[in-house]
Each structure stands twice: as structure tokens, then as C-alpha cells.
Image (spheres, rainbow, N blue to C red):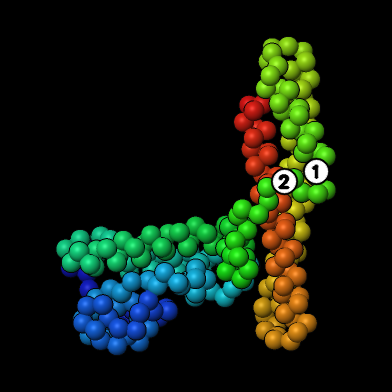
């Protein structure tokens, strides 16, 4: 595999990391392989994952196209092709491959895809929710009290069995809330994609865009909080 070479058909027409080849300083025209010296070029750290795979910033994507693009680019940048190349080329190959793997894992999962798009458009969603969602506040506080009581109980006692049964019911209810949140997210995803497809630049379109992003941020944040509570619950009663 060390004899692998790249011709014009192998070049990938993606956004460049730089305007000049790192090796021969030739002007680059958008390929990931230099026209003159045929050296692999680094993927830009500023390149968003959607652009990397030639996809629009939509939340409903063709996962078959995503997978096809991923394997195509993976073959072009695979470290096996660069084992007998320079240290610089091997490093670029490893960096490009790592970025592609992360981008693929992110975009193939609908929730991670939405969180990533929200991060691109409006800032990170990860560390927003530190308290229970307003509509679940009392329910979560009661659940936490039951969890604490269960942890301190004699697990073989009848009281512990009663608490465990209640916690199972709480888990079922919370998982239903998660499904409701995900259904609302799907509606927001459709609204976002429709707005993107229209491509309008009016004040009304900007206001709608801002509202959709805010609603997505709130629901994703609440969903993450509830998911963490469910995981804690499952670990406790397992």
C-alpha cells in the first residue's frame, strides 16, 4: 500500500486548510492534494463537519451519502497509505483521519448532529442545564429524595422493595418524557430544514431562525438533564 499515489481523480474538492501547499508553497485551488508535488494537505480545523462531507446544514441528512463520503475520504487519508512517507505527511494523515472519524460519529447520530449544529449556529448546549426543567422541578426533587432513601435502605427489606418499585415507575415516566422531548425536537428539526431550504433573509425569517434555535437549545438541554437523571436512576436500582 506504500506505493499508493494520487492523481487528479483522487483529489477531494473540499474547503482548503490553507491557500498554499505546506511542502512546495504552490498556490492551492481547493484540493486536498497539491497539483505540483501531490502532497496531502491538512484538513482545516475551522472546517465544519457538514461542509467536510459536502452536506448542507440541515438536520435531516441522507445517511447513505454521509457514509459514502466518509469511506471515500477515509481511503484517501488512511495512515496505511503514508507509512513510507515523510513524518509531516504521516502526521497530516493521522490528523485528517481523526477529524473525519469525529465528524462522522457526530453527524450520523441525530441528537449529536443537532447539538453540533446548535453549537455552530448559536453556541454550545452542553453545560446549560444545571437544575431540573421547570415543568419537572417537583417531580425531580421527589425522585432525588426517593433515590437517597433507597441508597440508605436495607436492600433486602420490604421498604426497599417498595422504593424500588416506585423508582421503576419514575424511570418509565421520565423515559416517556424523553420521548416527548424527542418528538418535539423532530418538529423543530423539520422547521429548521424548511427555513434553510427557503433561504430567506427577511427580518421575519431571522426571527424564526432565532426562535427555533432557542427552542432546540432548551429541549436539548432539558433532555440531557433528564437523561443523566435516568442513567443515575438505572445505576442505583440495577
Horizontally, residue 104 falls left or right of residue 29, namely: right
Disc on res. 137: 1
Separation (CA) of disc 2 from disc 1: 8 Å
| Residue drawn at 54 percent across, 62 percent down | 107
| Residue drawn at 67 percent across, 80 percent down | 197
Task: Tell me residue 16's x, y (percent).
Answer: 39, 79
Which sits earlier in the primary sequence, circle 2 or circle 1?
A: 2
| Residue drawn at 37 percent across, 71 percent down | 43
Q: Nearer the viewer, residue 158 or 128?
A: 128
Q: Nearer the viewer, residue 44 or 8?
A: 44
Q: Is residue 167 visible?
A: no
Up-down relation of residue 173 to residue 93 (above or below): above
Q: Nearer the viewer, residue 210 or 57?
A: 210
Residues at discs 2 and 1 in contact (Cβ within 8 Å)? yes
Disc on res. 72: none
Q: Nearer the viewer, residue 76 or 29?
A: 29
Q: Quadrant of residue 150?
A: top right
Disc 2 packing (10 Å; few <14; some 14–19; many ≥20)? few
Disc 1 packing (10 Å; few <14; some 14–19; many ≥20)? few
Task: Tell me residue 2's x, y (percent).
Answer: 19, 64
Disc on res. 131: 2
Amino acid at each position: 500500500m506504500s506505493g499508493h499515489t494520487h492523481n487528479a481523480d483522487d483529489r477531494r474538492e473540499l474547503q482548503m486548510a490553507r491557500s498554499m501547499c505546506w511542502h512546495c508553497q504552490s498556490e492551492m485551488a481547493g484540493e486536498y492534494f497539491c497539483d505540483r508535488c501531490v502532497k496531502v494537505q491538512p484538513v482545516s480545523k475551522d472546517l465544519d463537519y457538514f461542509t467536510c462531507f459536502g452536506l448542507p446544514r440541515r438536520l435531516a441528512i441522507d445517511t447513505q451519502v454521509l457514509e459514502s463520503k466518509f469511506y471515500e475520504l477515509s481511503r484517501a487519508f488512511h495512515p496505511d497509505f503514508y507509512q513510507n512517507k515523510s513524518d509531516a505527511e504521516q502526521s497530516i494523515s493521522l490528523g485528517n483521519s481523526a477529524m473525519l472519524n469525529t465528524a462522522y460519529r457526530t453527524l450520523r447520530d441525530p441528537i449529536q448532529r443537532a447539538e453540533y449544529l446548535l453549537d455552530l449556529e448559536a453556541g454550545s448546549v452542553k453545560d446549560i442545564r444545571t437544575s431540573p426543567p421547570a415543568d419537572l422541578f417537583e417531580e425531580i426533587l421527589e425522585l432525588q429524595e426517593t433515590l437517597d432513601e433507597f441508597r440508605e435502605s436495607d436492600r433486602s427489606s420490604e421498604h426497599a422493595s417498595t422504593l424500588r418499585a416506585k423508582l421503576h415507575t419514575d424511570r418509565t415516566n421520565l423515559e416517556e418524557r424523553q420521548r416527548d422531548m424527542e418528538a418535539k425536537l423532530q418538529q423543530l428539526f423539520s422547521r429548521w430544514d424548511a427555513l434553510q431550504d427557503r433561504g430567506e433573509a427577511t427580518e421575519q425569517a431571522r426571527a424564526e431562525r432565532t426562535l427555533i434555535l432557542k427552542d432546540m437549545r432548551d429541549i436539548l438541554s432539558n433532555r440531557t438533564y433528564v437523561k443523566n437523571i435516568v442513567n443515575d436512576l438505572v445505576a442505583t436500582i440495577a
